[in-house]
Image (cartoon, grey):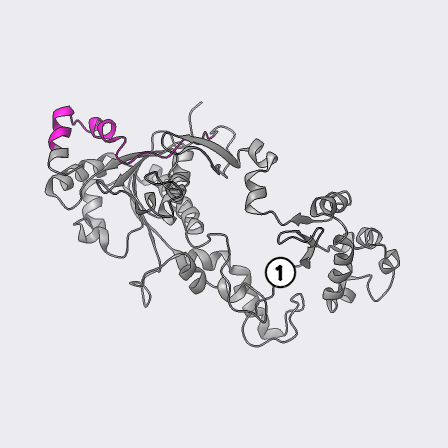
Amino acid sequence: MGKALDGVRVLDMTHVQSGPSSTQILAWLGADVIKLETPGRGDITRGQLRDLPGVDSLYFTMLNANKRSITLNMKSEQGKQVFDQLVSSVDVLVENFGPGVVDRFGYPWERLAELNPRLIYASIKGFGPGRYADFKAYEVIAQAMGGAMSTTGFEDGPPTATGAQIGDSGTGIHLVAAILAALYQRTNTGRGQRVQVAMQDAVLNLCRVKLRDQQRLAHGPLDEYPNDVFGDEVPRSGNASGGGQPGWAVKCAPGGPNDYIYVIIQPVGWQPITRLIGKPELAEDPDWATPEARLSKLDKAFGMIEEWTEKHTKWEVMEALNAHNIPCGPILSTRELAEDATLAELGSVVEVDHPERGAFKTVGCPLKLSDSPVEVERSPLLGEHNAEVFGELGYGADDLDRLRAAGVI
């Protein structure tokens, strides 16, 4: 059985996280992803946050699965000649350099389209054109300028970054959608096109409900928020769900840092909750029986639930609540996720063997296609596929020796 993107060839000129997260998904879907790296050093994350000396870091291995690696010196004339051939032979080129870097190599979009009119040239930048266009961007800067930090945390605390990498990997997923759309359009037009996603835009897209609430503020306080005071900006609201159904993280036994469970109170769930917490009379009490009655005292409602949950583990609470179809989710630590048997069975967390590192765990492909199953393969060693890829372009062993001697590869 073939893969969804069999026959699609991607030249991956990305580094760090946002770009590699995007091209890794393309590779998982079956594309032939060729990672182009600088000779001798490669992607900077090969050496960042190393836990084992002289071995590719987990930062690199967990973002570059199922790819082939080549090295090429883009500053040399011979390197540019090889690059011309590469561009002519691929369907997609992906990069996440700073603004103008690829242009300064001598390859603006117009030159790339001339080399390959069917090329999809996909880029991740920090910001779109305009005031911020030349600013450097990192994960948390994107969170800061996309609306996430101002709305994350508690009312009396500072703006807070989320542990989810919505600026980097979140943008990478957006770029996958754009690339696939451009490939599909090419089947009708025969032409490639320029594709760009800004990290600020991607984070803003993920924060759309907060932009929704900003506009709702013009008509009065946000009743589903736990805040007492509202100004002219959406406040930080702690663990409030921010949706139509109120939710909160409540403490469980034995009281460790992640011994919490998130509980949502739906109208249909209030009666079984009252029975579980030993206060069945509240199901009929007019001061508590309806969502409208509870809205002004949600802190007290969750306080009563917490008095019950503190006597049980989060797993016991999860079982009890799910038996009544009450939405809930235990707060899972990174250790618990890595050791979760269900996630392992689903392929959400997989173990991969690496020739230098040995076995390590990484995330599996989150996209599940019935006719395109994913086998997560290890990341490539630096330049591991030079002979293979350049051989496909017609370079023989003697040619490769000359290119190595000249520092081109």
Query: Quarter of the image holding residue 358?
Result: top left
Is label 1 in a helix, a strand or a loop?
loop
Q: In this view, does 156 lie above or below 82?
A: below
Give the image location of residue 192, x and y in percent.
29, 43
Stretch in magenta: 374-402
Left or right: residue 210 compared with residue 285: left
Residue displayed at 74% across by 44% down: 316
How far across and down, in percent of the image, does residue 33 sit? 33, 35
Which quadrant is home to the C terminus?
Answer: top left
Graded by Cα atoms within 10 Å as few (under 14), some (14 to 19) or many (20 or more), the crowding at tag 1 reads some
393 magenta-colored: yes
Q: Where is residue 79 in the image (x, y as percent from the top left)?
A: 15, 40
Question: Could you say which quadrant of the image residue 299 lies in?
Answer: bottom right
Which quadrant, please, contains the N terminus? top left
In percent of width and height, residue 144 lies at 44, 64
Instruction: Between residue 152 and residue 59, name the one nearer to us.
Output: 59
Foreground pick, 130 / 70: 70
Task: Give left or right: position of 405 versus 271.
Answer: left
The residue positioned 33% from the left and 65% from the top of the image is 132
The amino acid type found where label 1 is placed reads Asn
Residue annotated with mark 1: 239
